[in-house]
Image (cartoon, grey):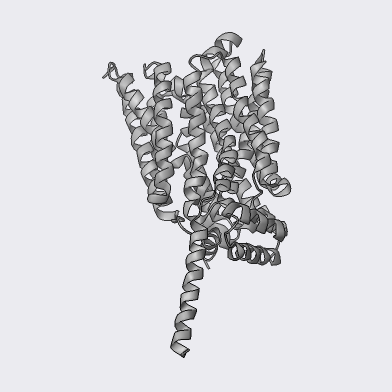
Amino acid sequence: MTMSENQRNLEAGLLLNKNRNDINECRITVVVLFSTFVSVCGSFCFGCAAGYSSVAQTGITTDLGLSVAQYSMFGSIMTFGAMFGAIFSGKVSDLIGRKGTMWFAQIFCIAGWLAISVAKDTVWLDAGRFSTGFAVGLFSYVIPVYIAEITPKHVRGAFVFANQLMQSCGLSLFYVIGNFVHWRNLALVGLIPCVLQVVTLFFIPESPRLLGKWGCDKECRASLQLLRGEDADVSEEANTIKETMILFEEGPKSRVMDLFQRRYAPSLVIGVGLMLLQQLSGSSGIMLYVGSVFDKGGFPSSIGSMILAVIMIPKAILGLILVEKMGRRPLLLASTSGMCLCSLFLAFSFSFRSYGMLDELTPIFTCIGVVGFISSFAVGMGGLPWIIMSEIFPMNVKVSAGTLVTLANWSFSWIVAFAYNFMIEWNASGTFLIFFSTCAAGIVFIYAMVPETKGRTLEDIQASLTDFLQ
């Protein structure tokens, strides 16, 4: 055999191995699908909790005689509880695992729904809502991180976006049945996805990257093998995870203050900036109290809720499809632009009404604006910040970074959720002009700062961002 023949055989063997590895990387196994479904049951719980405050407002205020301030506290205290959940989310997730954290969160979620269902006064209502919010704060960190760590790179964005899809499903379900079910019984309905996740968590693997971080090499490979398929060659992926963890372990231990080093600046600015944009755009206020927006515009809130329920799930599915077709950055820009235009549309609509103009058209304009805003949010801005957050931080700072970013999200969510009803009463047009300005600034921020992460491994993304300012 000649030298050239040996060379050709060697190249053919390398090409065969490369093709085999590419096939392994592109496989989507039943285990990955099922594990993603189990984890996003927590997202469904989040959607149910978010939709509850809107459809239950009339019933609770009537039965318990709550004022606007008292109900604003009830609606917003979920986000306040989520702030505390966010503080502990990263540490808890690393200490007891991604699966353990989801189990831990469900203790608070179940207790919260039970407390709301038997509440006789604001103390029980607020305590239950706070407990549910604490669980949501844990979910909002651990679910996207877990999904990002178990899925192949070519579908990671779509699978993490399932987080937003299931939130939309929970919202839609409560927007529909909330018009027919008493608020106490509606709280009991919220227990169903909680129990489902508690049971099914027994049947999914722990994150291989977390097992690698713990130094459990054997368990890490076993988890990868289960996720990628029995006949898949996981040695390359397992070695990459091990090498990355060794590199991080050799470096100094991460503290929160370490995040403010120059090398982590791009990741931190992007992560926190996207979370602030998501909340200061007014999304929390509109979704938590969408019924009051419809009422303010003269549109029947029950009909408006039904329209949203019909539209939100297809829009979220569209976002799931587009996130890997268009990429993160273009979809973020399109979503934020839609929210920007709809906010401006609502501002003009309420402004005309305040001057006695176009009164007969204001209800229709309100419906179009609200549905357009929430649909635009569901397509991109609702889920993409969490996807990007799960991708851009290295494992050695993921705990402190994820905690900080999640805390920033829920802190501003609480501010917006609590102030929203008062802002609408003060000046509806001015409120939506503020949201328009935030979205407009967000378009500039995304265009200037947010990178495209589609189709890249977590290690590649983190390395490129770390080296950005070097």
Q: Can residue 321 be seen by looking at this rendering?
A: yes
Q: Can residue 131 be seen by looking at this rendering?
A: no
Q: Position of residue 361 (x, y in %)?
A: 28, 19
- Residue at the far front in the pictured view: 1
Q: Is residue 152 above or below residue 350?
A: below
Q: Position of residue 430 (x, y in %)?
A: 39, 29
Q: Position of residue 103 (x, y in %)?
A: 69, 37
- Residue at the far bottom in the pictured view: 2
* 375 to the left or right of 261: left
* 271 to the left or right of 331: right
Q: Position of residue 388 (x, y in %)?
A: 51, 50
Taking depth in this image into account, of 36 and 108 the one nearest to the observer is: 36
Residue placed at 53% from the left, 14% from the top?
181
Q: Is residue 317 above or below residue 429?
A: below
Please tell me in which quadrant of the rendered image residue 293 appears: top left
* 459 to the left or right of 318: right
Residue placed at 58% from the left, 47% from the top?
31
Taking depth in this image into account, of 145 and 203 the one nearest to the observer is: 203
Residue placed at 62% from the left, 37% from the top?
137
Q: How many marks?
A: 0
